[in-house]
């Protein structure tokens, strides 16, 4: 099970989830960057990810389609802003493919990974929002609980990879 780390947000528009995950950093990176793995952990069950398309490079597009238990789909297009293999992934929904502005930018996600020794990884997911209202909405949607469940699902999958 993941171990919680207490990291305070740096602003009133930021949410942070930090854990020590009992899996190697390279495996966690794979889970974040390989579509067939993203579909297995990215949303809290009983939600699902029926489709993930990812061009993991700065400027590359991403489409993750989430589905609720009734099968209603919620496409989430975005663009990668920064990619440092096995260390850092920065993405946003402010743009869709080819730097087209989205209808309503909501967040920038920053995932950082650091070796903690003994096959464990320091995992920090920071989400920055355009407004305090967007941050509050994300929190009310269950950010901490939902992203926490996903971190546990991520850990289980990453541990299973060879």
Image (spheres, rainbow, N blue to C red):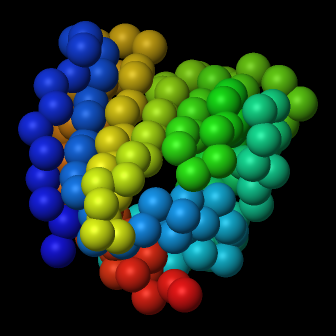
- Residue at far right of view: 98
Does residue 65 appear anywhere in the picture?
Answer: no
Q: Is residue 75 above or below residue 106?
A: below
Q: Is residue 122 above or below residue 161?
A: above
- Residue at far front of view: 117
Image spot of residue 107 (x, y percent):
48, 27
- Identify the residue at image location x=26%, y=35%: 16
Image spot of residue 81 (x, y percent):
68, 28
Q: Quadrant of residue 37?
A: bottom right
As drawn, is 160 to the left or to the right of 49?
A: left
Q: Is residue 140 above or below residue 1?
A: above
Q: Is residue 162 above or below residue 1?
A: below
- Identify the residue at image location x=60%, y=66%: 30
Does residue 155 appear anywhere in the picture?
Answer: yes
**In this view of the protein, which residue sits in the foreground, 11 or 3?**
3
- Identify the residue at image location x=76%, y=60%: 53
As drawn, is 21 to the left or to the right of 95?
A: left
**In this view of the protein, which residue sits in the foreground, 131 or 109?**
109
Q: Quadrant of residue 104?
A: top right
In the rendered image, the quadrant that contains the N terminus is: bottom left
In the rendered image, the quadrant that contains the C terminus is: bottom right
Image spot of residue 48 (x, y percent):
48, 75
Image spot of residue 73 (x, y percent):
58, 64
- The number of discs equals 0
- Identify the residue at image location x=51%, y=27%: 108
Q: Quadrant of residue 33?
A: bottom right
């Amino acid at each position: 099970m993941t171990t919680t780390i207490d990291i305070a947000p740096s602003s009133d528009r930021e949410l942070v989830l930090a854990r020590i995950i009992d899996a190697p950093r390279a495996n966690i990176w794979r889970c974040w960057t390989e579509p067939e793995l993203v579909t297995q952990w990215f949303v809290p069950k009983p939600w699902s990810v029926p489709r993930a398309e990812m061009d993991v490079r700065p400027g590359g597009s991403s489409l993750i389609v989430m589905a609720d238990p009734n099968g209603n789909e919620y496409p989430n297009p975005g663009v990668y802003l920064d990619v440092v293999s096995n260390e850092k992934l920065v993405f946003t929904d402010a743009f869709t493919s080819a730097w087209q502005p989205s209808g309503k930018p909501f967040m920038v996600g920053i995932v950082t990974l650091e070796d903690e020794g003994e096959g464990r990884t320091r995992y920090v997911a920071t989400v920055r929002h355009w407004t305090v209202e967007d941050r509050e909405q994300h929190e009310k949607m269950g950010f901490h609980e939902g992203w926490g469940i996903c971190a546990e699902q991520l850990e289980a999958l990453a541990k299973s990879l060879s």
